[in-house]
Image (cartoon, rainbow, N blue to C red):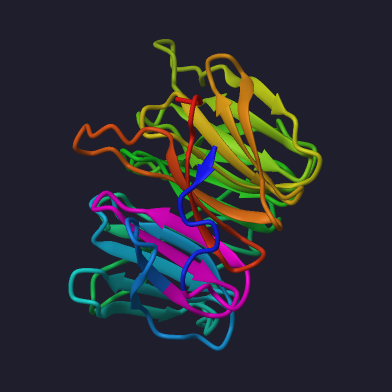
Amino acid sequence: MVSTHPAGTCPHKDAIWGVSWTPDDRVLSVSADGTIKQWDSGSGQVTRAGPRHPLGLTSLSTSQDGRYALFNSVEGLTQMWDLQSGNIVGKFESYARPTSGQLEPSWSVSLHPKATTYASCGGSGNVLVHSTEPVTFGQHRATLSTGRARFGLCCAYSPDGSRLALALETGQIYIFDAQALEVTATYTSHAMSIRTLSWSPDSSLLLSGSEDKRLILHDVRVSPSGKPGSGAVASLTGHSSWILSTQISPDGRLALSGSADKTVKVWDLSARAAVSTVQDTGEVWSVSWRPNPSGANVSGAFVTGGEDGHLRWWRAGGAA
């Protein structure tokens, strides 16, 4: 495992809580220092920075074409950044709740792959769907209810936009049909809070990482009889502390996990085993694989961010 930019350039001044490697080969990062940055993946240089926020940024999500970045602050200010123009095209103060009670301060946000809507979760235990239209940005469109008033730590649209996943502080995962707005599956695979969710490229598998130190791979497909898929199909163990971030590779064969034990692991999903372990300098809060839209030989490349505010680019020699 080789780091191509071991210390990074122009690091954040606090922990990096989210990274995303976009299809046009840019990397985005959000930090507890209140900034979002765009990086050139070849030089490791910052090419653009978004507006600084006085509080930390907790969540980052990008559209499938890499044009839009959605990010959220710790108190619930959600913004959408057009990476072509460099303009903020949407801003919503979710903490300024109306008397109707339909909204709540957002903690985690997820942009629909085509940027047609975005989802958010927080203290209610539900997923809220919002408008991304410039005039009505943030306006409430739908509520996907779990019936449990538990904090939602993470929500994520599937790559095909057909499903939404929600992870609760109590260890449950809910899968919703994004069109019917109904729960299609509930998983209780974890014993503690779930910190991270990642979909497979074909939207059939969901990988979760928890404070119980485990990664669980779930099959969310529905059988011809209409019954939910087989649920948990693998449990991946090896970290010695909380799992904070995970992502399945673009080809669906590998997965990354970043942990509070200061390591990154590369997993072979077919073998159900870790094939590489990288020692970092602090807790690893965010990981992202390099996309491969053109078929170029870039498999195994990924970027990480964490406690020390530095981005690190890696290539996985022997892991792919």
Rendering quarter of residue 236 = top right
| Furthest-top residue in this view | 225
Q: Is residue 96 left or right of residue 225?
A: right
Quarter of the picture holding the C terminus: top left
Quarter of the picture holding the N terminus: top right
Give how far across and how far down residue 38 sits, in percent: 36, 68
Give how far across and how far down residue 27 sits, in percent: 37, 59
Question: What residue is shown at x 40% (from left), y 40% (from top)?
Answer: 158
Q: Is residue 202 left or right of residue 312?
A: left
Question: What residue is shown at x 54% (from left), y 21% (from top)?
Answer: 269
Q: Is residue 84 above or below residue 227?
A: below
Give the magenta range: 10-36
Q: Check if residue 32 falls in the magenta segment.
A: yes
Give how far across and how far down residue 96 sits, in percent: 52, 85
Rendering quarter of residue 279 = top right
Q: Is residue 260 left or right of residue 41?
A: right
Q: Compare residues 131 and 206 and report the one nearer the observer.
A: 206
Give how far across and how far down residue 87 sits, in percent: 25, 80
Counting every numbered tag in the picture gives 0
Q: Is residue 65 above or below residue 240?
A: below
Q: Can residue 140 be seen here?
A: no
Q: Compare residues 228 and 37 and report the one nearer the observer.
A: 37
Question: What residue is shown at x 23% (from left), y 76% (from top)?
Answer: 134
Q: Can residue 174 be seen here?
A: yes
Q: Compare residues 248 and 76 and report the one nearer the observer.
A: 248
Q: Check if residue 85 falls in the magenta segment.
A: no
Q: Is residue 56 above or below residue 225?
A: below
